[in-house]
Image (spheres, rainbow, N blue to C red):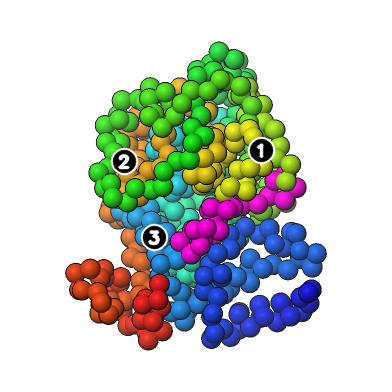
Amino acid sequence: MTIPKTWVMRLNTCCLLWEVKATPAKRLINTDNLSGVFAEVCPEKIDMDGLLLAGRQSMHRQDKMPWAFHEFWLRDMEHANGETAALTLDIRSDTGENRPYAFFPGCQLGAASPALVLAAWDELLALNADKRIPLSGMILRCCGAPAEWAGDEELYAAALDALRGDWEALGRPALACACPSCMRILGVRAPEIETISIYELFSSKARPDNSSGDDRMEPGDDAISKYELFSGEAQPEYSYGDDTPEPVSDAMQTQPTGLEQSPSRRSVEPANVFAVFDPCAAARLTGEGKSDTLRQSVRSLAKAMNLEVLPLPVQERVTRCCGFGGQPECADPAFVKKVREDRAAESPLPYLCYCMNCREAFLKAGKPSAHILELRYANTVDALPGLSPTKRRANRESLRDLAGARIARPCSLRHPAAGGTPAFPIKRRIASSPPPPGKTPGSWRNRGSAAAPQSKGARRNTARV
């Protein structure tokens, strides 16, 4: 049966102008990856992703969104934008002049490996010192994607306003992003904030330690000949019972020695042949030619590192999601697992990723994969997969504490605890409520503020989830 395009347009208009009172497909609406692929493959160019996102927003406005579907990701965003993890470094304190670029690594790269962020920051600082990349500073926080995907428009606006305040404090520079999802969301929701990928910057600039001006590494370079890939065995899921943080700060004060120290890695022959996996956000950036520029810069950077990258047959034609986008894992874990496995089976080669979410999704599926920055800094950086949420947050906090120490001279530190953009609490979807039948007060966790009112529908949703 073919659904007429006019029907879908009318339904979309209803979602935008009136609230859809009946929401029987809560789980289905929250299972979509919101990758944008529907509009590309549909003969009628129907944007089902936009329709489902409008459905999430309508559910949130009516307090019909089950809190379990997005609460974990929203709390993770709250931490990334809180006073223990968010930070703005202004290195223009000597002159105060506006400079074209500021480093914006995003929240997931630092949570997975603070050392990767610091290594890229060191390289940008060296290029800034050599007057090849004028740099104004660095911003550590989340772009607000979890709130956007959860349909919480008010919370997303607060996250975007906080980021915009940090961006203005640095003189409105172009944000050099390490995350394609940040580039895509900012391009749509904050077009005044110009973005560029750090891979484009690195592919067009010489390495600071190479006076010849050639970014190509020699075959014997440790970053190529001694790298290791993660084991092809499936990585364990997050261990929520292990709340002992890694001694990240102590390990990073002395430079890590290499990937071989990771207990979750094994040595492989340095074939240097990868299949490059383009994240869904990279194919749908706002701006003419911006997606092609990003994808080509990653391939040029890999070639300069003596890596041979081969295309994925289907992914080259239709760039699909790894399963992380839209955060459907809590709503439908089986769907996300199937998506990961399907993407991982597209090629027997290990995957070269430039999105940390893609890299970790494939490791959970048992697919050997590596982030391009892991290979670029493989002689000094050690990154571990499968970290618990507690350890990921400890990584962010250590990154915030250590980032300023990378500056040899005094700089301006701006964060919520020191007069910067104030931290904002999450407006809980579910307020405090008595425990459900059969639950004791001690076993029922408080899901929100006692002052916040709770609708009858919200209480029913709480009991059902």
Q: Give the left or right position of residue 451, taking residue 335 as reference.
A: left
Task: Tell me which segment is drawn in magenta.
Answer: 315-339
Was residue 209 drawn as part of the magenta stretch in this picture?
A: no
Judge depth for marks 1 and 3 and give the one in front: 1
**Identity of the amino acid at label 3?**
Phe
The residue closer to the viewer here, 460 or 427, is: 460
Label 2, label 3: how many angstroms apart (C-alpha)?
21 Å
Q: Quadrant of residue 36?
A: bottom right
Q: Which residue is tagged 2? A: 398
Residue drawn at 39 percent across, 64 percent down: 71
Which numbered disc, 1 or 3, marks the residue that appears first in the sequence?
3
Q: Is mark 1 on a helix, strand or loop?
A: loop
Residue at which label 1 appears = 347
Say what amino acid the circle numbered 2 marks: Ser
Estimate the x, y position of residue 111 in percent, counting from the top left: 40, 44
Mark 2 vs mark 3, foreground winner is: 3
What distance separates the C-alpha of mark 2 from that of mark 1? Answer: 36 Å
Q: In the rendering, at what x and y percent does residue 2 appear?
A: 79, 73
